[in-house]
Image: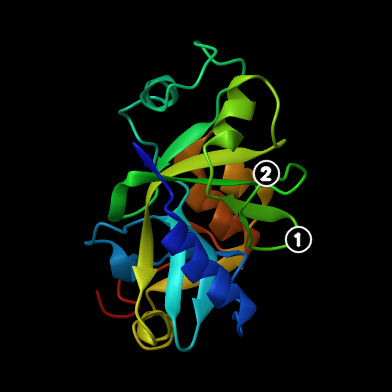
Amino acid sequence: MVFLHDSLLAQQQQASDTQNSPLVGQVLVASPALAQTPFACTVIYMCAHTAQGGAMGLVVNRRLPKPSFEELLAQLDITPSPPLRRIGVSAGGPLDVTRGFVLHSSDWKGTDGLAVTPDITLSASPLVLQKLAEGEGPHDAILAMGHASWGAGQLEEEILQQDAWLVAPALPEIVFGQDFSSKWRQALAAINLDPLQLTGQAGHA
């Protein structure tokens, strides 16, 4: 496991310093238009999105079966083992799948990190995992391996032209909850939609 590299964090920080869109800090919910793609039924927390720089987010509802949280900590030589606290590990997206991203509540602040919203931070340092292993650190956290990203204008096209994504509020149980299998339905419920109301004919796959 390699942790989030400074260049990517700097890129996202630069994006946050420009004109971040209202999508940042919310979740994208896959519509039936993505049913036959690797993004079927995914929920993605949006970390950055600008008209010029594209978008970056983390899938928060695909539990990573291997390696386990304990195995990832061992790769980073983080003790104690077993850790005093455990957090969920998600397959965060198809890019940089060997890199770890910790999304956590902003009640804990490390030496660096990107404040996505006043309540949620994307950390770049393994220090947050060290604190969690010691039973401390932020109240809420999730570790994502890899991320999803879009080029300039790509996400807008997928939302507006292809009906690929719905937008929902990033409720704590959706972002940080341990019940990964229920998050897609929870996100739909947050915008008063039932999966049975959705039709696979919407948009274009």
Quadrant that contains the C terminus: bottom left
Q: Are there few (<14), some (14-19), or many (20+) residues within 10 Å of tag 1?
A: few
Name the spot of residue 198 as percent of width and height, x first.
43, 67
Residue at point 62%, 65% (across, down): 25
Quadrant that contains the N terminus: top left
Task: Give 141 or 131, whichever is nearer the viewer.
Answer: 131
Q: Amino acid at mark 2?
A: Gly
Q: Which residue is mark 2?
A: 110
- Assign a secondary structure to mark 1: loop
Q: Is residue 36 left or right of residue 176?
A: left
Q: Amino acid at mark 1?
A: Pro
Task: Give 183 or 71, whichever is nearer the viewer.
Answer: 71
Name the spot of residue 30 as percent of width and height, x first.
41, 63
Residue at point 37%, 21% (across, down): 71
Residue at point 56%, 24% (across, down): 86
Q: Which residue is mark 1?
A: 118
Q: Are there few (<14), some (14-19), or many (20+) residues within 10 Å of tag 2?
A: some
